[in-house]
Image (tube, coloured by chain):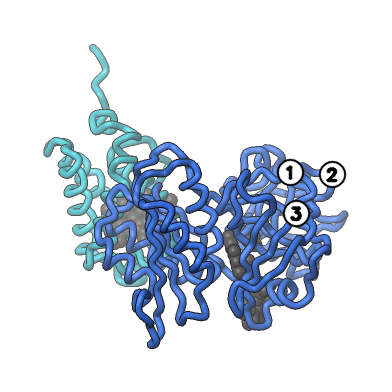
Chain colours: A blue, B cyan
Amino acid sequence: MAIIRYAKDNYDLEENQSVLDCLTHRGVALPFSCRSGVCQTCLMRATGGTPTEASQQGLKDSLRLQNYFLPCVCYPDTDLEVALPDDADAQAVIPATVKSLRLLNADIMHVELESHAQLDYRAGQFINLFQHQTLGRSYSLASVPHQDDHLHLHVRRLPQGRVSGWIHDELRPGQTVELRGPGGDCFYIPGDHAQSMMLIGTGSGLAPLYGIIRDALSQGHTGPIYLFHGSRDLNGLYLSAELRELMAHYANFNYIPCLSGDDVPAGYASGRAHDIAFEQIPSLKNWRMFLCGHPEMVRITKRKAFLAGAAMKNIYADAFNVSQPL
Amino acid sequence: MSQQESLYEQIGGEAAVNAAVDIFYRKVLSDERINAFFDDVDMEKQAAKQKAFLTMAFGGPHNYTGLDMRKGHAHLVARGLNDSHVDAVIEDLGATLRELGVKEELIAQVAAIAESTRNDVLSR
Ligand SMILES: Cc1cc2nc3c(=O)[nH]c(=O)nc-3n(C[C@H](O)[C@H](O)[C@H](O)COP(=O)(O)OP(=O)(O)OC[C@H]3O[C@@H](n4cnc5c(N)ncnc54)[C@H](O)[C@@H]3O)c2cc1C
Ligand code: HEM
Ligand code: FES
């Protein structure tokens, strides 16, 4: 049986137990959110032994080489000595100043952050924002490097949500917060400028898509770009004016706001965003897809897009998984 | 005597597996006879497993033993996996290769490899 060594203590790993569960079950305070290898909030470093291959999937090479891994999906056969990333590390926590906070609609806050160190990121990737050392959450980047001065996040308030509640109610401009990242592979890759692109997002799932679209357009993407943004009612949509303006500027960009509730004024599509998308564009052969937001929407849509002809490698998705209770 | 090309090489090796995986997986997911078995699994992980399956069926390099096949499908046998489902998988596999223009005699060899695992897959 493998032994996990953390902060000078030894913990026996039980069968079929992840390193994260092994430590948190014994009362060690560690950050985590999705517990499924997606959000990277739980990132740790092996200071002795080798982490499993599966626990390093999706990490940047530079992190992999330094034995960083995700303990929530690490089931090792051999002993590991592990540590939280600290300030001396390459994956150090980066301080950032809150520049501005403004509501985009009743539930979604636009957060502008000025990172104290240069953050090398792509629009659509996510950062992990920490309320304190053991409480962090992932938020996608709606800003575009070289186009926007600061980092932009769209944070949706969840009922009793710890970090989103803190951002909405307690965070103030001028305050310093800590972040880590960036991570994720949901971003625009230049190369095939004429490829058709479909982006589907629900709620604050618009954040990465707004970044990706502006990134693609500024890099000279010429193929048609369709954005389907879904919400239940009019109050849930946001940035509509900006998106309509973008549409007026770029003939290849199409914005289709979708409302799934009963009250659908003229100019809005009636139904769920992904249903409308597949109705309007039934064949997705050679299309590039971006799917962000509600995990169930992302799961269903990924499969539908694939069955409608999109190649697996052309489907980029970020499910906004919320933390799973232990 | 010069060495004969293996089945895997004749089909096109890893490149053929990569070309086949999306087509095959799409067929499996659209196939009402078997798609329930593939319903609740992560798509990327599932695609990686399809690749393992295709490599094996194409006679390529793999480390799976009969016992692995038993263990790997036991939870599906418990859910009712039977001969008709294996038939369907082999049929979808053949259709995939036909779509890629692979010769019938090679398709028959691939089907025979898949066939040879039937009893293990069904835990018999
Ligand atoms: C890759 C990625 C990108 C993301 N990008 C964004 C983004 O751009 N914008 C955005 O708004 N969000 C995004 N998210 C989601 C975000 O990371 C957080 O999950 C979200 O903000 C909720 O965090 P919280 O701390 O506020 O809520 P939590 O405190 O984690 O709670 C989440 C929800 O679950 C409920 N809950 C929590 N614990 C329990 C329990 N024990 N029992 C029952 N219910 C419970 C809460 O009531 C709440 O409604 C992203 C997630 C991922 C994985
Ligand atoms: C015809 C012979 C078959 C062979 C050679 C075969 C081979 C394989 C292989 C190599 C894997 C990957 C195992 C791993 O790495 O974990 C696998 C997984 C899987 N197979 Fe098969 N298979 C066969 C038939 C079937 C059939 C008939 C079904 C269902 C209709 C099926 C459903 C699955 C599923 C769902 C998985 C993934 C299991 C999981 O995610 O846990 N297989 N198979
Ligand atoms: S990646 Fe481990 S908690 Fe999300």
On whether disc 2 and disc 1 are found on a single subunit, the reply is yes
Of residues A168 and A59, the one nearer the viewer is: A168
Instruction: Report the residue marked by disc 1.
Output: A118
**Subunit of mark 1?**
A
| Res. A22 image quadrant | bottom right
Residue type at mark 1: give it.
Gln
Which residue is identified by label 3?
Answer: A114
Q: Is residue B34 above or below residue A158?
A: above
Q: Along the polypeptide, which appears first: circle 2 or circle 1?
A: 2
Q: State the residue at coordinates (45%, 71%).
A: A296
Q: Chain of mark 2?
A: A
Q: Nearer the viewer, mark 2 or mark 3?
A: 3
| Marks 3 & 1, CB-CB < 8 Å contact | no
Q: Which residue is mark 2?
A: A88
Of badges 2 and 1, nearer the viewer stands 1
Q: How far from the left and from the top, in percent, is residue A81?
A: 78, 49
Q: Mark 3: which amino acid? A: Glu
3D distance between C-alphas at marks 2 and 1: 17 Å
The extreme left residue here reads: B104
Q: Element under label 2?
A: loop
Residue mark closest to the camera, 3 vs 1: 3
